[in-house]
Amino acid sequence: MNSSHHPPRDRLLGPVELVAPTILGATLSHAGVTVRITEVEAYAGERDPASHAYRGETARNAVMFGPPGHLYVYFTYGMHHACNVVCGPAGVGTGALVRAGEVVDGCELARDRRGARVRERDLARGPGRLAQALGITLADGGADLFADGPARLVLDAYPPEFVATGPRVGVSLAADVPWRFWIAGDPYVSDYKRSPRAP
DNA sequence: TGACAGATGTACT
DNA sequence: GTACATCTGTCAG
């Protein structure tokens, strides 16, 4: 149930490290697949050395400097896409990386995209896997998650259970800042890996 | 469990 | 031109 009378987009305003955990338990849908979000990370724009927005706005990260509730998609390691929900007011460049989820609808489609041999638990466990399961690519960058488009975010289940906190995965700067949030005990959460370049 | 290849955009020199 | 990235799958041990 959703007791708030505010539009869902307004729930994404505020400091991203406080907003990000409220995305846990929400559902993200795209192209016939829906996932229940189990793990997120906060990236705090120009005040966060690990953020793509740390050095200010560029063509790549421009979406994060726009209004909240839009999808910032980036492509990395030459083969993986990852999805962020833009948070905070326009201009600050903050967002929440959606790191993992449980596929709750469209399992067949997700498996087609991820491969027939992939275990159900691994369909969307990890940011690259989640984007692939949902069929999200750079073409979806900038999509409004609260409009009548192909990508939709439904924020109505928080808090799901106890929220656990720890350092973010794979970041070499600000490697100890505890801005990774996941649903405690949930099996659909990725493994922690510290960046090999972290101090 | 751990090391590493894989492939390309981005930011910085 | 160069280093490296909000990663994943595979193979050695």
Image (cartoon, coloured by chain):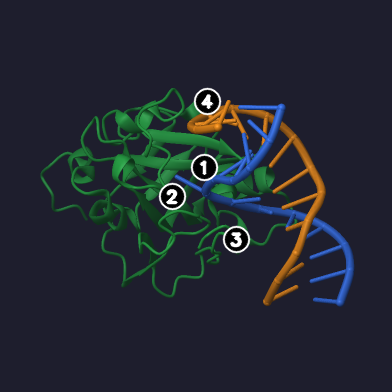
Chain colours: A green, B orange, C blue
Which mark is on residue A139? 4
Label 1 close to label 3 by CB (< 8 Å)? no
Q: CA distance from mark 1 to mark 3?
A: 20 Å
In the rendered image of this protein, does residue A172 appear above or below residue A53?
Answer: below
The chain holding disc 1 is A
**Secondary structure under the numbered disc 3 in the rendered image:** loop
Residue appearing at x 57%, y 57% in the figure? A197
Residue at numbered disc 3: A196
Q: Are marks 2 and 1 on the same chain?
A: yes
Q: Amino acid at mark 2?
A: Val
**Secondary structure under the numbered disc 1 in the rendered image:** strand
Q: Earlier in the sequence, mark 2 or mark 1?
A: 1
The chain holding disc 4 is A
Q: Are marks 1 and 3 on the same chain?
A: yes
Residue A162 position, x and y percent, is 31, 73
Q: CA distance from mark 2 to mark 1?
A: 8 Å
In front: mark 3 or mark 2? 3
Residue at numbered disc 2: A98
Label 2 close to label 4 by CB (< 8 Å)? no
Q: Amino acid at mark 3?
A: Pro
Q: Residues within 10 Å of mark 1 (few under 14, many from 20)?
A: many
Residue at numbered disc 1: A82
Label 4 close to label 3 by CB (< 8 Å)? no
